Image (cartoon, grey):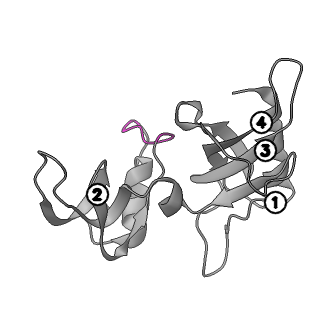
Amino acid sequence: MNRTLTSIIALALAGGGIAIASSGPDAECTPGTQFMVVVDAHVPATDEAPARCLRVPVVTECGDPPSLAWTIDSEAREIPCGTLAEGEVRRVPVAEAFPESVVGEVERVAVGDEPAVAPYVGVCQGPGCRCASERCEALPIGGPNSTADSPPYFVRRLCRVTPEAPECP
């Protein structure tokens, strides 16, 4: 990803332009942990590239203010700029960006040759995946999903919505 995009996102996080609750009853993350959000960013023109707008998942280091850990370049995609002003960064609801990537009480409806899967507690990513109850949330694709993390990011998100899941400590 280019330095301009990284700088724009880092500044938006540091200046409070991308709201991430790290304390209080609506806390999304706790200080010192990583949390993923999805943003739309207007990247100004440079000598190497014209101005464009991108939707990109980013990994933040939770804190007050949060900081940018890295962007998930493999999942970045160009979008129409619409009302984004030059240099503007706007948080996008994860459910809008990744509607078929969910964690918690999930299910999969039949799609093509793939059969439906009854509701279960876990992660579902792909065509036909959706929440089976309100105890579910959208999960960004990419980022700190390595099973080497302890516990893996998707397990931390699973435990937020279904603390009784066997994977939860």
Query: Could you tell me the amino acid type at mark 2?
Result: Cys
Q: Is residue 21 visible?
A: yes
Real-space CA distance between mark 3 and mark 1, rounded to the nearest whole angstrom:
14 Å
Which of discs 1 and 2 lies nearer the camera? The answer is: 2
N-terminal label among 3 and 1 = 1
Magenta residues (range): 142-148
The residue drawn where x is 74% and y is 46% is 41
Counting from the top left corner in percent of width and height, residue 83 is at 78, 57
In contact (CB < 8 Å): disc 3 and disc 1: no
N-terminal label among 1 and 2 = 1
The residue drawn where x is 43% and y is 41% is 149
N-terminal label among 3 and 2 = 3
The label on residue 39 is none
Would you name the residue on which mark 1 appears? 17
Would you name the residue on which mark 4 appears? 5
Q: Nearer the viewer, residue 163 or 109?
A: 109
Question: In the picture provided, is 64 more to the left or to the right than 45?
Answer: left
> In the figure, residue 23 lies in which quadrant?
bottom right
Q: Is residue 169 visible?
A: no
Query: Could you tell me the amino acid type at mark 3?
Result: His
Would you name the residue on which mark 3 appears? 42
Assess disc 1: are there few (<14), some (14-19) or many (≥20) residues with their C-alpha within 10 Å of its C-alpha.
some
Counting from the top left corner in percent of width and height, residue 34 is at 59, 50
Would you name the residue on which mark 2 appears? 129
Q: Secondary structure at mark 4?
A: helix
The residue drawn where x is 31% and y is 47% is 126
Assess disc 4: are there few (<14), some (14-19) or many (≥20) residues with their C-alpha within 10 Å of its C-alpha.
many
Q: Quadrant of the C terminus?
A: bottom left
Question: In the picture provided, is 108 more to the left or to the right than 7?
Answer: left
Which of discs 4 and 3 lies nearer the camera? The answer is: 3
Q: Secondary structure at mark 3?
A: strand
